[in-house]
């Protein structure tokens, strides 16, 4: 596997009832923190209901985050393109690509919350049908084509973009996948990347991962696309890391119950099944024992990433799902520990210093003797010089 990229997939998940202004500010500060730590990507969600995922426009958030960061790439995770006029989706992303000087990425999906789509008169079947049609339109627009087409929700007449993307030929595009083959089908058909969001959130999650990529490869071949590059495949996973497992378990007492309760009782999103645990210990056990994530130490985190790499066959980026299981300070510390100790293992940066240490250790005795010999030599030389001048 080549250099593995790391990032976050920030829905976000905030407990209802708290100050939303401060919660959004905390999200921006987290992206700034990740930029300083050397994370590669941050994907920002779009949601409009249910009280926890409170970013309505990932594009607006990304514009604010871009002004506060220098290196990290910013993606929509995802734009629910079934809700929007595809012309304006493409146009806004091209504008962001220019504003960020090429740090923009477009993630596409049908929209995950039925409570969102129902407010604009759409059901989950509608949104999945519209995803396919709207993505086709967006891809044509980004290639510079003029599009005339009537969809179930919009009518385009000689629609075209007045700007080309800043990125040549285009910024990264990825389609989300949770349980159905919709995302992988679209990724293969259009030759774009895949965001596997919920593939590790089931007991047989690793089989879902293999299924996702098999569909991408099969559809790419069917539509005459080049063989898909696993570097464009991003896996979203669950982690909270501390110096000890005991500390990590204590940290997540802060907010893990809200996160589980959200998927168990609030969000009508059964694809993100998180079991039926009702106590913190059971929730931690579900994450760790089902193999869907890691609550523990950096060694646990390394093992989880390696397990995903081995069982998936390889992928390009590991995205940590933003969940606020822990308080802000402990959350930032978890990201720091992963950047300091986990990322180097999968980016070719750990081996060099370890090898250098081992070489120095293996030759230490001989080099130490030569150092002492040098000191002895100079001491004798000095004594000789004193004798010659005395």
Image: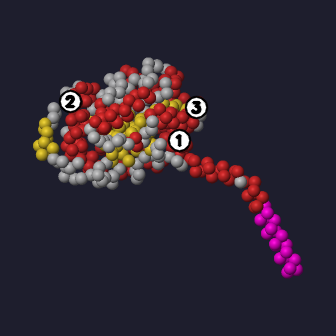
Residue 203 placement: quadrant: top left
Residue 241 visible within the image:
no
N-terminal label among 3 and 2 = 2
Classify mark 2: helix, strand or loop.
Answer: helix
Residue that protrudes farthest toward the bottom in the picture:
389
> How dense is the environment of label 2, judged by Cα within 10 Å: few (below 14), some, or many (20 and up)?
few
Vertical order, 281 against 150 (above or below): above
Residue denoted by label 2? 120
Residue 110 placement: quadrant: top left
In this rendered view, identify the residue nearer to me: 212 or 57.
212
Verify whether residue 382 appears in magenta. Answer: yes
For the C terminus, the image quarter is bottom right
Give me the C-alpha separation between circle 2 and circle 1. Answer: 43 Å
Residue denoted by label 1? 342
Q: Residue at x 38, y 42 (%)?
A: 229
Classify mark 3: helix, strand or loop.
Answer: helix
Q: Residue at x 15, y 47 (%)?
A: 146
Query: Principal SS element in the magenta part?
Result: helix
- Horizontally, residue 249 falls left or right of residue 97, namely right
Q: Which residues are the magenta region? A: 372-390
- Asked whether the residues under the numbered discs 3 and 1 touch, taking CB atoms below 8 Å apart as contact, a structural biologist would say no
Residue denoted by label 3? 245
Q: Position of residue 233 (x, y in %)?
A: 39, 39
Give me the C-alpha separation between circle 3 and circle 1. Answer: 16 Å
Please state which of the two labelled residues, at mark 2 or mark 1, is closer to the viewer.
1
> How dense is the environment of label 1, judged by Cα within 10 Å: few (below 14), some, or many (20 and up)?
many
Please state which of the two labelled residues, at mark 3 or mark 1, is closer to the viewer.
1
Residue 389 visible within the image:
yes
In this rendered view, identify the residue nearer to me: 223 or 382.
223
């Amino acid at each position: 596997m080549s250099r593995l990229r790391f990032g976050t997939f920030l829905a976000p998940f905030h407990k209802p009832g708290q100050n939303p202004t401060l919660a959004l500010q905390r999200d921006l500060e987290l992206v700034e923190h990740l930029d300083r730590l050397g994370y590669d990507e941050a994907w920002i969600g779009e949601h409009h209901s249910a009280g926890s995922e409170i970013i309505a426009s990932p594009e607006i958030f990304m514009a604010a985050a871009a002004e506060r960061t220098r290196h990290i790439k910013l993606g929509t995770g995802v734009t629910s393109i079934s809700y929007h006029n595809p012309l304006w989706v493409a146009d806004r992303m091209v504008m962001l690509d220019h504003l960020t000087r090429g740090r923009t990425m477009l993630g596409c999906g049908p929209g995950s919350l039925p409570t969102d789509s129902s407010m604009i008169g759409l059901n989950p079947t509608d949104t999945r049908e519209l995803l396919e049609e709207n993505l086709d339109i967006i891809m044509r627009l980004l290639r510079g084509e003029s599009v005339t087409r009537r969809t179930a929700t919009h009518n385009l007449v000689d629609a075209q973009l007045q700007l080309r993307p800043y990125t040549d030929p285009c910024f990264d595009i990825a389609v989300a996948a949770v349980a159905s083959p919709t995302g992988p089908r679209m990724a293969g058909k259009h030759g774009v990347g895949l965001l596997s969001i919920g593939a590790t959130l089931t007991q047989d999650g690793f089989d879902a991962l293999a299924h996702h990529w098999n569909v991408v490869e099969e559809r790419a071949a069917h539509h005459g696309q080049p063989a898909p590059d696993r570097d464009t495949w991003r896996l979203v996973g669950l982690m909270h890391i501390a110096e000890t497992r005991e500390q990590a378990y204590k940290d997540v007492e802060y907010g893990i119950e809200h996160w589980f309760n959200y998927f168990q009782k609030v969000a009508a999103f059964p694809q993100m099944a998180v079991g039926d645990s009702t106590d913190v210990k059971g929730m931690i056990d579900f994450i760790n024992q089902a193999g869907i994530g890691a609550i523990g130490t950096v060694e646990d985190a390394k093992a989880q990433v390696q397990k995903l790499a081995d069982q998936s066959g390889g992928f390009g980026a590991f995205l940590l799902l933003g969940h606020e299981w822990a308080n802000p300070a402990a959350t930032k510390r978890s990201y720091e520990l992963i950047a300091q100790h986990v990322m180097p293992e999968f980016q070719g940066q750990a081996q060099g210093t370890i090898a250098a240490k081992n070489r120095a250790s293996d030759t230490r005795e001989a080099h130490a003797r030569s150092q002492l010999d040098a000191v002895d030599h100079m001491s004798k030389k000095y004594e000789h010089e004193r004798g010659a001048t005395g």
